[in-house]
Image (cartoon, rainbow, N blue to C red):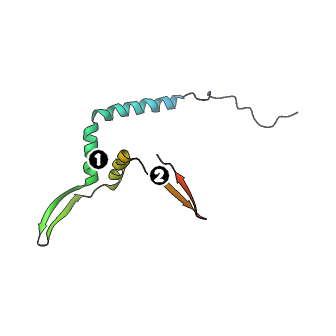
Amino acid sequence: MARSGTNHKGGRPKGSIGPTAIKIVEARKFLVEEIKKDLEPIVLAQKEAAKGLWYEEISNTGKKRVYQREPDLKTGEFLINQVAGKPKETLEMEGGIAIKLDVL
């Protein structure tokens, strides 16, 4: 009599890490160590990018800000998310059903 289904006993054991995953873990460790060495200037550069580069120009109507480089809103959002945590996002579907997503 024939059996239905297949026997899935082959392959890597559950919970084991393959060679690709090991390379990724090693690469991530290397990246973290390299970034730690220059963490302060990197964070300060991101902070400056978020604020933009500007100077004040005095005209007949008063002072005004002139931007040489516009503020980078994505960098500002990233920094705020790092400090305050990323907000919960709500996805609304047709029919008025709202689903809260925990996005990391």
> Picture coordinates of residue 29 (x, y %)?
40, 30
Q: Secondary structure at mark 1?
A: helix
- Residue closest to the eye, 104 or 30: 104
Residue at image x 46%, y 33%? 24
Asked which quadrant contains residue 82, the reply is top left
Number of disc labels? 2
Depth check, front residue: 81 or 69: 81
Q: Amino acid at mark 1?
A: Gln
Q: Is residue 61 above or below residue 5?
A: below
Please give left or right for residue 63 compared with residue 21 in the image: left
Q: Which amino acid, mark 2?
A: Lys
Q: Which residue is mark 1?
A: 46
Q: Label 2's element? A: loop
Q: Quadrant of the N terminus?
A: top right
* Image coordinates for residue 93, horizontal then vertical, percent: 57, 61
Residue that numbered label 2 is attached to = 88
Residue at 52% x, 51% y: name it.
101
Image disc number at residue 20: none
Which residue is at a point 85% across and 34% down the rendered structure image? 2
